[in-house]
Amino acid sequence: SQSECRTQCKSVNLSSSVQVLIMGLDSAGKSTLRLPSQTVNTSPTVGFNVGTLELNKQSSLTLWDIGGQKSMRQNWQYYLDECKALVFVVDSTDAGRMPEAQKALKSILSDERLRGVPLMVLANKKDLPNSMTIREVSNKLNLNSFTDRVWEIQACSATQGLGLQQAFLTVNKLIKRS
């Protein structure tokens, strides 16, 4: 329920590291991002998963992996209060769902609490055949229309860990600049 979600979101307080939300449609590979050095079998996230990513001795990010099923997206708003960066994950092999991903991204970025919050788009599954280029993903998500925020896009493979370290180091830099 929504009140249960609000209570859970507020009750998890993880040190002083910076809160980063990981959102995207279901099956984009969000949960796999949290463990890039391991092969894991994941199941759909119901609610959220939280973990800390240590970047170096001075910096860590608290990653909130938020479920992306259509029924869960209405609850995304309850996770925004302390968000310092948004990582939006898309399945770069699934061109058919890009309009849905664009709509979800536009909707969440329209929330006043995300004004000025940096955006990192991860075009996941780049290791698979028929994956779109980051230019194609960028065009399909209409990222150039987001002129009021700093954003970057990076190709990655969550299962192989490709591109993830660089992506989260970039997220950290974007947060420090904003």
Image (spheres, rainbow, N blue to C red):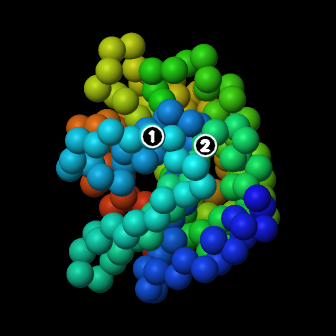
| Relative vertical location of residue 53 with respect to residue 146 in this rendering, above or below | below
Residue at 45%, 21% (x, y): give it: 93
Instruction: Give the crowd class for mark 1: few <14, some 14-19, many >=20 residues within 10 Å.
Output: few
Residue 116 image point, x, y percent: 66, 65
Looking at this view, is 95 or 8 the one in front? 8
**Residue 151 at least partly seen:** no
Question: Where is residue 41, by image quadrant?
Answer: top left
* Count of numbered marks: 2
| Relative vertical location of residue 128 with respect to residue 40 in this rendering, above or below | above
User: Which residue in the structure is indicated by mark 2?
Assistant: 68
User: Which residue in the structure is indicated by mark 1?
Assistant: 43
**Residue 147 at least partly seen:** yes
Label 1, label 2: how many angstroms apart (C-alpha)? 12 Å
Image quadrant where one finds the N terminus: bottom right
Residue at 46%, 45% (x, y): give it: 30
Q: Earlier in the sequence, mark 1 or mark 2?
A: 1
Residue 35 image point, x, y percent: 29, 52
Residue at 29%, 83% (x, y): give it: 58
Instruction: Name the amino acid, label 1.
Output: Ser
Looking at this view, is 133 or 127 the one in front? 127
Instruction: Give the crowd class for mark 2: few <14, some 14-19, many >=20 residues within 10 Å.
Output: many
Instruction: Name the amino acid, label 2.
Output: Gly
Question: Where is residue 84, by image quadrant?
Answer: bottom right
Which-is-in-front pick, marks 1 and 2? 1
In the displayed structure image, the side of residue 92 where residue 111 appears, left or right: right
Label 1 sits on a secondary structure element that is: loop
Q: Residue furthest bottom?
A: 16
Residue 157 image point, x, y percent: 31, 36
Looking at this view, is 156 or 150 the one in front? 156
| Relative vertical location of residue 103 with respect to residue 17 in this rendering, above or below | above
Residue at 62%, 64% (x, y): give it: 117
Image quadrant where one finds the C terminus: bottom right
